[in-house]
Amino acid sequence: MSKVNVAFVGMTHLGLNSAAAAALRGHDVVGFDPDQALVSQLSKGNLPVAEPGLDEAVANHKNLLRFSSSLDDVRAADVVYVAPDVPTDDEGTADVQPVRSLVELVSPVLKPGATLVVLSQVQPGFSVSLDLPGDTLFYQVETLVFGQALDRALNPERYIVGCSDPAQPLPVQYQALLESYDCPVLPMKYESAELAKIAINCCLVASVTTANTLAELCEGIGADWSEIVPALRLDRRIGQYSYIVPGLGISGGNLERDLAAVVRMGAAAGTDTSSIAAAISNSRYRKNWVLRQLHDKVLHAGSKPRIGVLGIAYKKDTASVKNSPSVGLMSALEGYNIVAFDPVAKLPDEIDQTTVELAESALAVADNSDVVVIMTPWDEFSEIAPEELIRRMNGKLLIDPFAVIDGKLAHVAGLEYHTLGIRKAQH
């Protein structure tokens, strides 16, 4: 394997995990960020994001991965990735200015023959707007999945590469870097690559929306969604890796951003995108499943139940709370007595820190609670014994949308158990 000198610019979630993966693949890597304070913390091993295996990867590969705020280190690289996270607002609108600013910062210092690759997800038309030489500029579709970011960066399914001219061979050092990951490389036009990521996410959303919709239908007609899933896994048109486990809508920010982008682009192009708009509406409805359960069972007029919330992050194995159903639930329950715990994530600023008690452990959430809800399916929550829960609780209601705890064991312990896709408590 040819070792490549590569720089990743922008040390947020995407750039940091991608840099660590390149070091794990044996390349000489510099993680650049103009924020000197951030670089200082990174150099000490204090990482701003939580991902399985990331701390160890950075600590164990200091001979290949270093951090810098000096443009001289970018100048030495053969391949330079611009890879900051792209922030979105509450409407799913992406702000690509941080990406553009970093491109403008580093492009003048590229050495002759170096390749600049935009890794951050941008909207179609962004790459051509940079007005950089086509033999220098490429757009590569990122594979980031929160909670699996390092593994996805290290073991990609394929690389989608946007080019000025897909018929031309990729630069030698860039080609060598991609080949070291041992996966298919799909060159295509800039605009096609930029839309490809959105297309992938839209197909994923279709699976999620279908699963969520039919799982709730099961609750109404007496079917059991968990019995149906194996049949779908065995259908080659759907497959064993499909996103067909029901959940609380679409969270995290990236999928919402792409759905909003399709709606805006469709309006500009004069085409119908009502199916995508329906997915957005469906997701908003799904996020309130737990709140509807609480209103149905414990939030009666004048009642002030103590509500234990397990999980703050929008999904397990990440500290991200962007569009988290748990955060949305706590916002809707403002004024109620809430106690919460998450092994990694913190309460965001939008939650009044004085109204939510933070427990020191998962079991402590159950102490004197009238109801416990599991809002993030962390693996450690599955180890909670139902009999220990009911021993500590005042009430008996356990709302577990992701079926983290075995419903039959919960019933045997005396809990009133509710999960997605089943009409009533397990018997």
Image (cartoon, rainbow, N blue to C red):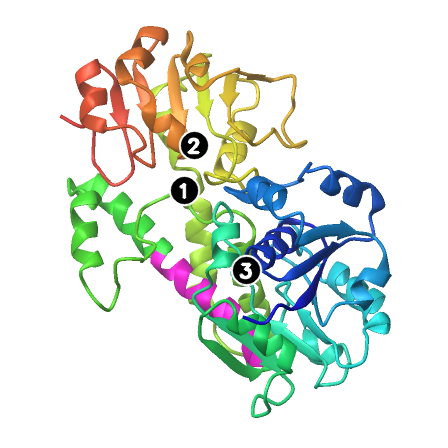
Residue 266 can be seen, yes or no = no
C-alpha gap between disc 2 and disc 1? 9 Å
Name the front one of labels 2 and 1: 2
Q: Is residue 25 above or below residue 317?
A: below
The disc placed on residue 25 is 3
Name the front one of labels 1 and 3: 3
Q: What residue type is labelled 2?
A: Met
Q: Residues within 10 Å of mark 3 (few under 14, many from 20)?
A: some
Which residues make up the magenta segment?
Answer: 191-207
- Residue 277 placement, left or right of 407: right
Which residue is located at x 64 percent, y 77 percent? 173
**Residue at which label 2 appears:** 375
N-terminal of the pair, mark 1 or mark 3, is 3
The disc placed on residue 216 is none
Instruction: Pick the quarter of the image with the C terminus.
Output: top left
Task: Say which element carries label 2.
Answer: loop
Which residue is located at x 55 percent, y 72 percent? 178
Q: What residue type is labelled 1?
A: Leu
Q: Which amino acid does label 3 sit on?
A: Arg
**Residue at which label 1 appears:** 248
Residues under numbered marks 2 and 1 in contact, where contact means CB atoms less than 8 Å apart: yes
Q: Residue 397, located in which quarter of the rendered image?
A: top left
- Residue 90 placement, left or right of 227: right
Task: Say which element carries label 1.
Answer: loop
Q: Which of the two residues, 281 or 310, is positioned nearer the viewer here?
A: 310
Q: Which of the two residues, 35 or 216, is positioned nearer the viewer here?
A: 35
Q: In this view, does 376 lie above or below 395?
A: below
Inspect the magenta stretch and tell me whether residue 198 lies in it: yes
Instruction: Pick the quarter of the image with the N terminus.
Output: bottom right
